[in-house]
Image (cartoon, rainbow, N blue to C red):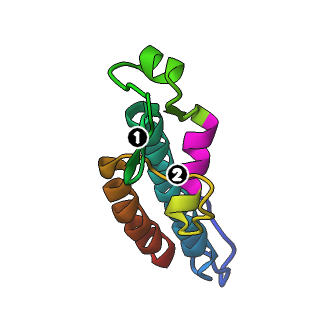
Amino acid sequence: QRLLPRGARVKRHGSDGSGEALDALVGASLQFGALILAGTLFHRLYEHCTCSDGALLLEDCVDDDYETCVKTGGHITTWVSALYLSVITLTTVGFGDHVPHTKLGQAFGCAWMFFGVVATAS
C-alpha cells in the first residue's frame, strides 16, 4: 500500500462510472461476438449446401452429401456468407439477399433475431 499525504484522496477505478460503462461495453461486445460466432458455425456447418429454397425444392438437386449437392446445383453457404447471414439476422436487418434454406435454419433464424434484440437491449 502506498502512503499518501494527509488529506489526499484516492480515486477508485469506476467511481465516476466510466469503468462500469467500459465493463458493460466489453461484456456486451463479447456476448455479441459469441452469438455471431455461434450463428456463423451453424449456418456454415448445417446449411453448407442444401437443395431447399425455403418452401420449394430445387429441381434435379440431390443433397445426400456435400459433393452431390454442389454438383447438382444446390445452394452453397461459404464461411463469408455464413458470417454475413449471421450478422444481418442477429441485428435483425435482414436484407433478404441471404436467407436460411432449411426449416431448422428458419427456426434458428427466428430464435436468432430474438437473441439479437435481447443482446442489443442489454
Q: Is residue 62 above or below residue 24?
A: above
Q: Amino acid at mark 1?
A: Phe
Q: Residue at x 46, y 15 (%)?
A: 67
Say whether residue 37 is left or right of residue 7.
Answer: left
44 and 65: which is toward the camera: 65
**Distance (Cα) linking label 1 and label 2:** 9 Å
Q: Could you classify mark 2 by the number of other residues whose Cα lies within 10 Å: few (under 14), some (14-19), or many (20 or more)?
A: many
Q: Are marks 1 and 2 in contact (CB under 8 Å)?
A: yes
Q: Is residue 17 above or below residue 71?
A: below
52 and 2: which is toward the camera: 52
Whether the magenta-drawn stretch holds residue 85 is answered as yes
Residue tagged 1: 42
Q: Residue at x 59, y 61 (%)?
A: 96
Q: Residue at x 68, y 80 (%)?
A: 8
33 and 84: which is toward the camera: 84
Residue 25's x, y, as percent? 58, 67
* Residues in magenta, as a range: 80-87
Main secondary structure type of the part rendered in magenta: helix
Number of residue marks: 2
> Looking at the rendered structure, which numbered label has been put on residue 105?
none
Q: Amino acid at mark 2?
A: Ser
Q: Which quadrant, please, contains the C terminus? A: bottom left
Looking at this rendering, what residue extends furthest in the top direction? 67
Residue tagged 2: 86
Q: Could you classify mark 1 by the number of other residues whose Cα lies within 10 Å: few (under 14), some (14-19), or many (20 or more)?
A: some
